[in-house]
Image (tube, rainbow, N blue to C red):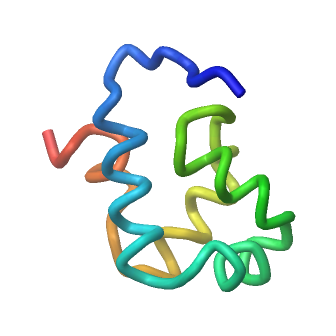
Amino acid sequence: MRTKTYPDQGIVDRLNEVLTAHGSDFTWAKNLGVDRKTVWAYRHGVSDIPATLLWKVCKVSGVSAEWIMNGGA
């Protein structure tokens, strides 16, 4: 699979940091209602994470969406 190019690669890095710190791909897949391969694709920037799932990640992890999207800027 090919990695997408984001204007800010930091989004992928921060999302990956949150997902790694708060569970396995299997756990996130179950929590988000998606396949484990889909979580992998979000982690590696292959697929964009939909806003609805990003909000679930934030709710479960306690991390703000602003930080994931902007690095807190």
Position of residue 14 measured from the top left corner of the image (x, y, whole percent): 32, 51
- At x 64%, y 73%, the residue is 25
Up-down: is 44 above or below 64? above
Q: Residue at x 34, y 50 (%)?
A: 68
Q: x%, y% of residue 5?
A: 48, 15
Indicate left or right for 54 with 50 as reference: left
Compared with 60, 37 (above or below) is above
Q: Is residue 59 left or right of residue 1?
A: left
* Residue 36 sits in quarter: bottom right
x then y, percent, for residue 23: 51, 84
Quarter occupied by the C terminus: top left
Where 64 falls versus 71 (above or below)? below
Q: Position of residue 55 (x, y in %)?
A: 57, 62
Point out the residue furthest to the front here.
1
Q: Quarter holding the N terminus? A: top right
Q: Nearer the viewer, residue 9 or 58?
A: 9
Q: Residue at x 42, y 54 (%)?
A: 15
Residue 70 lies left or right of residue 4; in this view the side is left
In the rendered image, the vertical position of residue 10 relative to residue 43, given as above or below: above
Between 57 and 37, the one lying in front of the other is 37
Number of numbered labels in the structure image: 0
- Please state if 73 lies on the left or on the right of 61 as rendered: left
- Give the image quarter of residue 4: top right
